[in-house]
């Protein structure tokens, strides 16, 4: 086959029908667990004013410094036209918080629980499990601060992972990074500690020491890790209230039976976090391919121009969940099978088939047919290739006699039946439990 002229851009991929089976399954699990816990669905736009991410996530984070996809646009008013820069969302939290402010959600009963599922974009170097376009499931609890909320949010995630049968492949890493004041004091001490030692730091970390020193804590660089062993620790700067909050959270997680690992190096890559931070790590490969992560962001809404409002949230990577499901040998129901193939010959037969096909579909039978003008024999071969369970054949002779041939593809047996009985016969053979009928409510669930 010739090389295709166009391919997906680097770091992106088509979500092919096979993977959609997994995606639909994941969305269903998320929907149920989210609804059970009182979350409502929200969909902020895929692009937002660039400043929302810069202010929220932090100017000196990797995501904002290196990974934003910028989209340029024009902002027109009656009098003037100016350039405006948007960014494709690298995550969904900042957009949801913008929406909370914009729609005055502080007037609703608090906490406001929202969830979203959708594409995110990061202009990162693509590698296994790291793409430029990927999907996140995002849950946010805004407007109230209580360790029971952090614990319940984590518990909902664990339930989702358990439903997907990947919970035992993941470990919950948990840390307390204190309040903004605690971190400020710690960072002063950390910077002091590194005075005179900068040259021992690898270049990237030397830069981070200036721009985002908290990230030194989760540095992968050996030299940095060695130096950190004698550096002040964040834990020493965390105040009593914050410690008490965390201890209560741990108690609640234990109460809920959620296993966790204390990880003093966990800081997360986004500036808006404080107090609770957590990640779900691959038990075998560790942080590199975390399946999800989140934490408390009590300052974010104020940063975006709202009233001081606490919040806690989590984001889970859909592609990474799918990867784990496949690794664990989890199979998901495939609903894309063909039940009936309708083969026909001649213009009259073709016309009659159209209503037959429509009737079968209406009853919940997956039906394809009336595909062209090919011979009955080659249509039969096609039916086989599509994996149809039954084939209905309508030739010129059958039309004349008011009959149709019903063939059981697996058994290789066929019989002639009355045309008017075709739908009923097929329904009987398939069994009512195998019909793909839906109520509107279920239909929305598939979206
Ligand atoms: P983060 O908030 O950056 O930790 O992202 C939350 C989750 O989104 C991660 O745990 C991953 O599962 C997923 N994720 C983040 N970045 C990417 C990416 N570039 N490609 C695929 N999944 C990603």
Image (cartoon, rainbow, N blue to C red):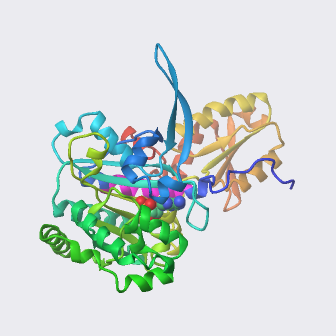
Relative placement, left or right, of 412 versus 169 is right
Residue at the image position 28 percent from the left and 70 percent from the top: 186
Residue 180 image offset from top left, x and y in percent? 25, 60
**Is residue 299 or residue 126 the one in the foreground?**
299
Q: Is residue 43 something that shows in the picture?
A: yes
**Is residue 367 or residue 327 the one in the foreground?**
327
Residue at the image position 30 percent from the left and 79 percent from the top: 232
Residue 341 image offset from top left, x and y in percent? 67, 46
Number of numbered discs present?
0
Looking at the figure, which quarter contains the C terminus?
Answer: top left
Residue at the image position 51 percent from the left and 67 percent from the top: 331
Relative to 222, does residue 148 appear above or below in the rendering?
Answer: above
Residue that sits furthest to the top in the current view: 78
**Can residue 246 be found in the magenta stretch?**
no
Q: Is residue 291 something that shows in the picture?
A: no
Looking at the figure, which quarter contains the N terminus?
Answer: bottom right
Residue that sits furthest to the right in the current view: 2
Relative to 64, does residue 360 appear above or below in the rendering?
Answer: above
Residue at the image position 73 percent from the left and 55 percent from the top: 385
**Which quadrant of the view contains residue 342?**
top right
Residue 238 image offset from top left, x and y in percent? 20, 71
Residue 407 image offset from top left, x and y in percent? 68, 52
Q: Main secondary structure of the magenta part?
A: helix
**Can residue 29 be found in the magenta stretch?**
yes
Relative to 414, does residue 206 appear above or below in the rendering?
Answer: below
Magenta stretch? 20-33
**Is residue 88 or residue 398 the one in the foreground?**
88
Relative placement, left or right, of 446 versus 19 is left
């Amino acid at each position: 086959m010739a090389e295709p002229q166009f391919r997906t851009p680097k770091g992106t991929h088509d979500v092919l029908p096979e993977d959609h089976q997994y995606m639909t399954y994941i969305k269903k699990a998320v929907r149920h667990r989210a609804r059970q816990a009182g979350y409502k669905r929200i969909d902020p736009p895929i692009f937002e004013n660039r400043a929302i991410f810069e202010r929220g996530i932090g100017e000196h984070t990797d995501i904002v410094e290196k990974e934003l996809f910028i989209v340029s646009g024009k902002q027109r008013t009656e009098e003037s036209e100016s350039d405006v820069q948007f960014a494709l969302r690298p995550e969904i939290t900042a957009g949801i918080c913008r929406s909370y402010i914009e729609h005055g959600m502080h007037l609703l009963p608090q906490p406001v629980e929202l969830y979203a599922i959708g594409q995110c974009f990061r202009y990162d170097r693509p590698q296994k499990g790291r793409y430029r376009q990927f999907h996140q499931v995002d849950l946010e609890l805004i407007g109230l601060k209580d360790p029971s909320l952090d614990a319940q949010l984590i518990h909902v995630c664990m339930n989702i992972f358990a439903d997907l049968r990947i919970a035992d492949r993941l470990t919950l890493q948990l840390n307390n990074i204190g309040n903004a004041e605690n971190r400020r004091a710690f960072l002063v001490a950390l910077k002091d500690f590194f005075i005179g030692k900068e040259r021992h730091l690898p270049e990237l970390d030397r830069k981070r020491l200036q721009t985002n020193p908290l990230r030194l804590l989760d540095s992968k660089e050996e030299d940095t890790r060695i130096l950190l062993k004698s550096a002040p620790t964040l834990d020493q700067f965390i105040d009593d209230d914050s410690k008490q909050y965390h201890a209560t959270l741990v108690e609640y997680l234990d109460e809920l039976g959620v296993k966790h690992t204390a990880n003093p190096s966990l800081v997360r890559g986004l500036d808006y976090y404080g107090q609770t931070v957590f990640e779900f790590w691959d038990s075998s490969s560790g942080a590199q391919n975390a399946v999800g992560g989140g934490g408390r962001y009590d300052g974010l809404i104020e940063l975006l121009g709202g009233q001081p409002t606490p919040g806690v949230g989590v984001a889970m990577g859909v592609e990474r969940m799918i990867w784990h499901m496949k690794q664990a040998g989890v199979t998901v129901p495939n609903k894309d099978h063909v039940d009936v193939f309708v083969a026909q010959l001649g213009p009259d037969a073709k016309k009659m088939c159209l209503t037959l096909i429509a009737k079968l579909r209406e009853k919940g039978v997956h039906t394809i047919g009336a595909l062209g003008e090919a011979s009955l024999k080659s249509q039969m071969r096609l039916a086989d290739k599509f994996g149809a369970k039954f084939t209905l054949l309508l030739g010129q002779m059958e039309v004349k006699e008011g009959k149709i041939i019903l063939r059981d593809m697996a058994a290789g047996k066929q019989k002639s039946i009355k045309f008017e009985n075709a739908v009923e016969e097929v329904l009987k053979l398939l069994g009512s439990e195998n019909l793909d009928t839906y109520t509107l409510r279920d239909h929305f669930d598939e979206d």
